[in-house]
Image (cartoon, rainbow, N blue to C red):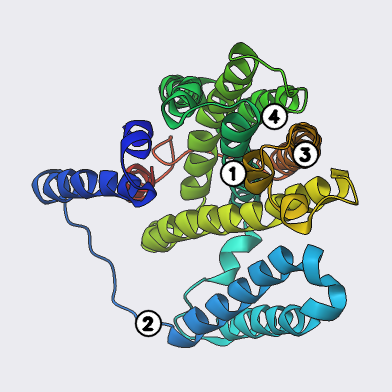
């Protein structure tokens, strides 16, 4: 549907898809979602502000570093370090912290958190890069691009159900690591794409990525929620969301910076600056030499970016292997029912 809207209307029309989805979700929540209540605590406004300042400064620093260098971003880097340091100190001393730091003393919680962050880190960059590759390098229309992403969506949907069923038999640690290895394999296939790749190689790679994420993420989320005390289940659910959003923001920033820097470095030095810094103007220039150079430079840059993403996924495997020993999913034997309910909400 997004592809159809982009093909026939202005680019902003794609966001209208969220309106009917939100309406259905609100009605479903009112009709089907049971209320849950926990003890009231005072909002940690200082923690909120410090986390926003630190994260914003860090993401801006990463995005701007390739163009400005250390001399141009050191103020924001210092601000990020101060913001995060002050946030940790605040959370350790606060009576009702936004993020109870003692949760990270649990190695299963820590392992699940960082595994999720690294997976979303890799996936966020993947979507950013592949969309440009399919449309600008392979010349796909918005509709064909949408169809090309279908194998990833279907594989994720099917494997989430399979993974949820197998986690109880094989264990969440085994499922997390197995899914991460499949995801790493899919990312590895993406590094082999060329300017002449047809439909099936990207489709195979995206199917592997979707299958790996579908197997790994429900297991990791289950382990995370299973490690949270029932009275802090709401905090655990919120942290799960925040960890994934942070991983996505950092993934777009870091992998996007790698892509942009590699692309610029791969273009001819005598090419106009506007085409050396951006793929779209290069393709639109109509100059066959510039178009060919841009397609080749972007594909090589994409391979470098996906290599970094694959390393991120393999790092998540290592983290899960060493820190998720003995992990149990929410709802497993010995895990309170309240935590299991929060797991459903987190999914």
Kindly give the residue lying farthest to the front in the view shown: 287
The residue tagged with tag 3: helix, strand or loop?
Answer: helix
Query: Residue 197 sits in which quadrant?
Result: top right
Q: How far apart are marks 2 and 3 (CA)?
A: 55 Å
Q: Are marks 1 and 2 in contact (CB under 8 Å)?
A: no
Closer to the camera: disc 1 or disc 2?
Answer: 1
Q: Distance between the residues labelled 4 and 3?
A: 28 Å
Reading the image, the residue beneath label 1 is 128
> Is residue 85 visible to the viewer in this orientation of the structure?
yes
Q: Do the residues labelled 1 and 3 touch (CB within 8 Å)?
A: no
Q: How far apart are marks 1 and 4 (CA)?
A: 14 Å
Mark closest to the chain's N terminus, 1 or 3: 1
Binning the other alpha carbons within 10 Å of mark 4 as few (below 14), some (14 to 19) or many (20 upward) gives: many
User: Where 128 falls versus 295 (above or below)?
Assistant: below
The residue tagged with tag 2: helix, strand or loop?
Answer: loop
* Residue 43 - label: 2
| Residue drawn 46% across the image and 49% down it | 225
Q: Distance between the residues labelled 1 and 3?
A: 23 Å
Question: Where residue 307 appears, x then y in whole percent?
Answer: 79, 36
User: Where 212 falls versus 24 (above or below)?
Assistant: above
| Residue drawn 52% across the image and 50% down it | 227
Mark closest to the chain's N terminus, 4 or 2: 2
Image-based side of 250 in relation to 207, left or right: right
Image-based side of 61 in relation to 167, left or right: right
User: Where 135 falls versus 31 (above or below)?
Assistant: above
Q: How far apart are marks 4 and 2 (CA)?
A: 41 Å
Question: Where residue 335 appears, x then y in whole percent?
Answer: 42, 43
The residue tagged with tag 4: helix, strand or loop?
Answer: helix
Closer to the camera: disc 1 or disc 3?
Answer: 3
Reading the image, the residue beneath label 3 is 290
């Amino acid at each position: 549907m997004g592809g159809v809207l982009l093909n026939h209307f202005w680019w902003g029309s794609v966001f209208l898809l969220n309106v009917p989805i939100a309406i259905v979700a609100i009605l479903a929540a009112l009709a089907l979602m049971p209320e849950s209540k926990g003890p009231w605590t005072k909002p940690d406004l200082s923690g909120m502000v410090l986390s926003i300042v630190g994260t914003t400064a860090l993401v801006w620093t990463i995005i701007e570093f390739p163009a400005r260098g250390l001399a141009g971003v050191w103020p924001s880097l210092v601000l990020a370090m101060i913001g995060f340091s002050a946030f940790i100190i605040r959370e350790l001393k606060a009576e009702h912290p936004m993020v109870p730091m003692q949760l990270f003393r649990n190695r299963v919680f820590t392992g699940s958190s960082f595994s999720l962050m690294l997976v979303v880190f890799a996936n966020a960059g993947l979507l950013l890069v592949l969309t440009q590759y399919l449309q600008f390098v392979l010349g796909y229309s918005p509709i064909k691009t949408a169809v090309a992403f279908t194998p990833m969506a279907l594989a994720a949907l099917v494997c989430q159900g399979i993974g949820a069923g197998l986690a109880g038999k094989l264990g969440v640690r085994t499922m997390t690591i197995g899914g991460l290895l499949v995801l790493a394999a899919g990312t590895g296939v993406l590094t082999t794409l060329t300017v002449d790749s047809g439909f099936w190689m990207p489709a195979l790679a995206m199917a592997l990525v979707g299958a790996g994420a579908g197997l790994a993420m429900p297991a990791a989320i289950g382990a995370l929620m299973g490690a949270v005390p029932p009275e802090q289940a709401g905090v655990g659910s919120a942290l799960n969301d925040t960890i994934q959003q942070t991983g996505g923001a950092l993934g777009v920033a870091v992998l996007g910076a790698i892509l942009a820097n590699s692309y610029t470095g791969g273009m001819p030095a005598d090419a106009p600056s506007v085409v050396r810094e951006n793929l779209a103007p290069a393709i639109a220039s109509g100059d066959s030499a510039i178009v060919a150079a841009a397609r080749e430079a972007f594909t090589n840059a994409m391979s470098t970016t996906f290599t970094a993403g694959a390393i991120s996924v393999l790092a998540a495997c290592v983290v899960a292997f060493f820190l998720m020993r003995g992990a149990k999913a929410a709802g497993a034997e010995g895990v309170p029912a309240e935590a299991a309910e929060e797991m459903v909400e987190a999914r």
